[in-house]
């Protein structure tokens, strides 16, 4: 039986999609119908990805936050809820594990207002919001979906926003993509530990899922390295007699549209070189997984990046839910 490569990003499974560009930020929108749902194993719904190159500096981070907020606002608007509909924001994951801490860290910066409504404070421009950090089943012994459903039954919000870490099949997407969906989510999918689905069907109210891929399989890293090696060799071959290239110590060949022909690939890696990209990934995956070496890997600067990402997620949610935030 073939092992299944892990990805939570729908645009890695469906190539035909609409793309919009906002400076260095790319937005991709995909609607998954019943037919596509059966093909790719993802729920019916709208999936929007916000892809960016960098959030390490303030201006870049604020641009991503703005685009993310606009896309999230559109998803919420499509739910056809009232302007004062209340929202429960759920931060999934484990704060003790950095790549899985996106949800809990984002909750620290979201604006919670229900207590203001309870004591009669002036809440003009703010929506009634709640926040919940359910923890992980391994610590609480309670299925996350059951816990959320119980809280929903008690406080009765009109819709949910659920934040979680995801997985990708590309090194380039890690910490550089935000996916928004109205189709719900499976907690723990980013670290290969799927729990009960959290969706309108299981919870009873609309669920908007927000996630960022923070990990990638070791098999993906090996496969991508092979592809980069092909590209590097093709670049060097094409620039062998170019005098200017000899003056460059380090070249970012990934930005050049260079390809290695199949004959060269087979010369380099023999039979493996005859495989296409998907076949190469699957072969490596099937070699590493049975012996427990298909580790999930995260960048060494993940502590820094997860802090920036949680700020983007929380800031975008605040702007989408509260008109008063946009007027500050």
Image: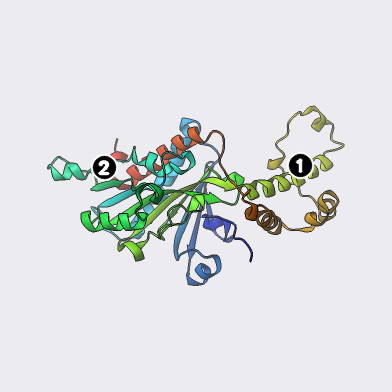
* Label at residue 269: none
Label 2, residues with CA under 10 Å away: few <14, some 14-19, many ≥20: some
Residue 138 vs residue 159: left or right? right
Q: Looking at the image, which residue is at 14% across and 45% down?
A: 118
Disc 1/disc 2 C-alpha distance (Å)? 50 Å
**Residue at the extreme left:** 120
Q: How is the protein colored in the picture?
A: rainbow
**Residue at the extreme bottom:** 35
Q: Position of residue 260 (x, y in %)?
A: 79, 50
The total number of labels drawn is: 2
| Quarter of the figure with the N terminus | bottom right
Label 1, residues with CA under 10 Å away: few <14, some 14-19, many ≥20: many
Q: Position of residue 299 (x, y in %)?
A: 57, 38
Q: Looking at the image, which residue is at 86% across and 51% down?
A: 267
Mark closest to the chain's N terminus, 1 or 2: 2
For disc 1, the marked residue is: 232
Residue 106 higher or lower than 81, as above or below: above
For disc 2, the marked residue is: 112
Q: Position of residue 145 (x, y in %)?
A: 35, 57
| Quarter of the figure with the C terminus | top left
The answer to whether the residues at label 1 and label 2 have Cβ atoms under 8 Å apart is no
Q: Looking at the image, which residue is at 69% across and 49% down?
A: 223
Q: Secondary structure at mark 1?
A: helix
Does residue 46 appear in the picture of this structure? yes
Q: Looking at the picture, tell me which residue is in the foreground, 286 or 326.
A: 286
Q: Position of residue 231 (x, y in %)?
A: 75, 45
Does residue 158 appear in the picture of this structure? no
Residue 114 higher or lower than 251, as above or below: below
Q: Looking at the image, which residue is at 54% across and 54% down?
A: 19
Q: Looking at the picture, tell me which residue is in the foreground, 233 or 271.
A: 271
Q: Secondary structure at mark 2?
A: loop
Residue 172 vs residue 148: left or right? right
């Amino acid at each position: 039986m073939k092992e299944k490569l892990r990805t939570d990003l729908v645009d890695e499974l469906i190539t035909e999609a609409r793309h919009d560009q906002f400076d260095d930020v790319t937005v991709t929108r995909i609607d998954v119908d019943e037919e596509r749902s059966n093909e790719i194993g993802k729920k019916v719904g709208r999936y929007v990805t916000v892809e960016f190159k960098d959030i390490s500096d303030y201006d870049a981070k604020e641009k991503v936050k703005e685009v993310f907020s606009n896309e999230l606002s559109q998803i919420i608007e499509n739910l056809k809820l009232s302007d004062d509909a209340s929202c429960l924001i759920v931060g999934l994951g484990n704060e003790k594990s950095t790549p899985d801490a996106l949800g809990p860290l984002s909750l620290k910066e979201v604006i919670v207002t229900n207590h203001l409504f309870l004591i009669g404070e002036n809440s003009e421009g703010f929506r009634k919001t709640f926040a919940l950090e359910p923890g992980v089943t391994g610590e609480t012994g309670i299925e996350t979906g059951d816990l959320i459903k119980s809280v929903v039954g008690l406080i009765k919000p009109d819709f949910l926003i659920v934040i979680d870490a995801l997985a990708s099949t590309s090194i380039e997407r890690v910490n550089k993509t935000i996916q928004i969906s109205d189709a719900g989510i499976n907690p723990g999918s980013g670290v290969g530990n799927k729990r009960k689905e959290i969706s309108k069907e299981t919870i009873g109210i609309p669920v908007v899922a927000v996630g960022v891929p923070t990990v990638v399989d070791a098999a993906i890293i090996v496969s991508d390295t092979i592809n980069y090696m092909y590209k590097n060799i093709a670049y060097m071959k094409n620039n062998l007699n170019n005098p200017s290239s000899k003056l460059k110590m380090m070249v970012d060949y990934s930005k050049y549209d260079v390809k290695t022909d199949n004959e060269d690939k087979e010369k380099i890696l023999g039979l493996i070189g005859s495989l296409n990209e998907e076949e190469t990934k699957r072969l490596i995956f099937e070699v590493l997984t049975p012996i427990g070496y298909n580790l999930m890997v995260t960048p060494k600067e993940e502590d820094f990046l997860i802090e920036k990402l949680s700020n983007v997620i929380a800031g975008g949610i605040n702007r989408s839910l509260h008109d008063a935030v946009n007027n500050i």
